[in-house]
Image: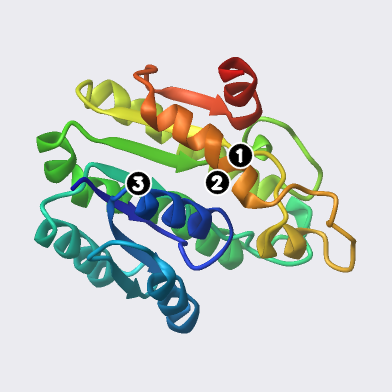
Amino acid sequence: MPVAIITGASRGLGRALARELAGREWHLVLDARGADDLGTVQAQLPGGPHHALAGDVTDPMHRASIAAAARALGGASLLINNASSLGSSPLLAFRDLDPATYVDLLRVNLVAPMALTAALLPQLRRNGGKILNISSDAAVEPYETWGGYGSSKAALDHAGRVLAAEEPTLRIYSLDPGDMRTRMHQDAFPGEDISDRPEPETVVPAVLSLLDSDLPSGRYVAGQLVSEAA
């Protein structure tokens, strides 16, 4: 069975994708910081075996454990870099963003996914794999107070483009999923009602259409993928 790695799999889009891929008989390696929530997701998944590894994706030892778990299952065919950080809540203007917070944000949203990708490249090359980096419209739109998060995602988008040029046998995608009703989105708008945002499960068909396709490496928007498929 094919093997997928999903970071940030304990809730939101990561959890929704884990459930869908497990239902498609993928073997999964799941990462998240919260052991209890991640264990609950693992216990609810059909099929298997699935490995749930709680830890911090910025930790090199944790990334090595993820790569080893995927190797034990036969090697990764898919990496979904979904784990992300806002850096602060509420979001701050650049002038107020503490440099240490900005560095931590870049470590989570840029350095960690690219380092995990590098660790998995031998497996992905052997399996003709795909890499999906979850991006944001904040990577291309200059929203006030979103500068830290948005610039980290813009950098991840560009890093993916460079990697695609270096690894032409792989498909490397960045996906803007659009607004979703997630804990992170609520943290971006503390005290506001975000019940009008769609659930993460509504984005899953767009992700699947991209992963099932042979579209060239590049940046895609979930809403456009669904419209084109319809």
Protein image colouring: rainbow
Residue 190 in picture, x, y percent from top left: 83, 66
Query: What residue is pinned by disc 3?
Result: 24
The disc placed on residue 152 is: 2
Name the residue type under label 2.
Ser
Q: Quadrant of residue 221?
A: top right
Sequence-first tag of 2 and 1? 2
Looking at the picture, does residue 130 appear above or below residue 216? Answer: below
Label 2 crowding class (10 Å Cα cut-off): few <14, some 14-19, many 20+? Answer: many
Sequence-wise, which precedes: disc 1 or disc 3?
3
Q: CA distance from mark 2 to mark 1?
A: 16 Å
Q: Secondary structure at mark 3?
A: loop
- Residue 57 visible in image: no
| Residues at circles 2 and 1 in contact by the CB criterion of under 8 Å | no
- Pick whichever, 195 or 119, lies toward us: 195
Select label 3 or label 2 by which is in front: 3
Q: Residue at x 45, y 57 (%)?
A: 19
Q: Secondary structure at mark 2?
A: helix
Three-letter amino acid code of the residue under disc 3: Arg
List the residue tagged with mark 1.
177
Inspect the image, locate mark 1, and give the three-letter code of the amino acid beneath it.
Pro
Q: Nearer the viewer, residue 5 or 17?
A: 17
Q: Earlier in the sequence, mark 3 or mark 2?
A: 3
Q: Quadrant of the C terminus?
A: top right
